Amino acid sequence: MGGRLDYLQKQPVAALVYKHRAHIVNVFIRRVDSAATMPAGHAQQQGYNLIRWRKDGLDYALVSDLNEKELRQMAGLLESQLASK
């Protein structure tokens, strides 16, 4: 759907916005400094799922009200696209 510059924890992040059926999926991407910590994995809070991982000096976080299984599938597609580049 688009993208924007956003801020998480007072740091600039790229935010890509996708639509999957009636669900919005935000993908946040930020550079990693040596002191940054962002555990990989899944979390759920207030009806939203969060999938996180780190690759090649960047942190990735997918956030949506989409169910965990489908959000993991989207994360896998994004990771495979990144790996092919």
Image (cartoon, rainbow, N blue to C red):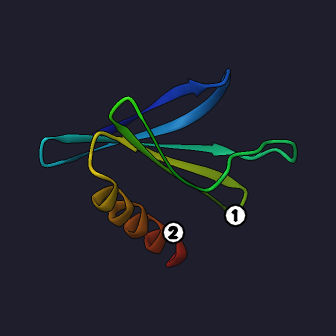
Q: Name the residue under label 1.
A: 56
Residue under the point 50% across and 29% down: 5
Is 65 displayed left or right of 60 in the figure?
left
Q: In this view, does 39 lie to the left or right of 71?
A: right
Please name whichever residue, 63 or 34, is drawn nearer the observer in this view of the structure.
63
Image coordinates of residue 13 in percent, x first then y, are 58, 35
Q: Which residue type does callout 1 highlight?
A: Asp
For image coordinates 51% across by 47% down, the residue present is 61
- Residue that numbered label 2 is attached to: 82
Return the x and y of residue 63 as percentages of the image width and height.
41, 41
Query: In which quarter of the view is residue 2 placed?
Result: top left
Is 31 left, or right, of 44 in this rendering?
A: right
Give above or below for 45 relative to 54: above
In the depicted structure, whether residue 6 falls above or below residue 57? above
Figure quadrant of residue 22: top left
Q: Name the foreground residue: 38 vs 28.
A: 38
Q: Which residue is drawn at 34% across and 41% down?
A: 64
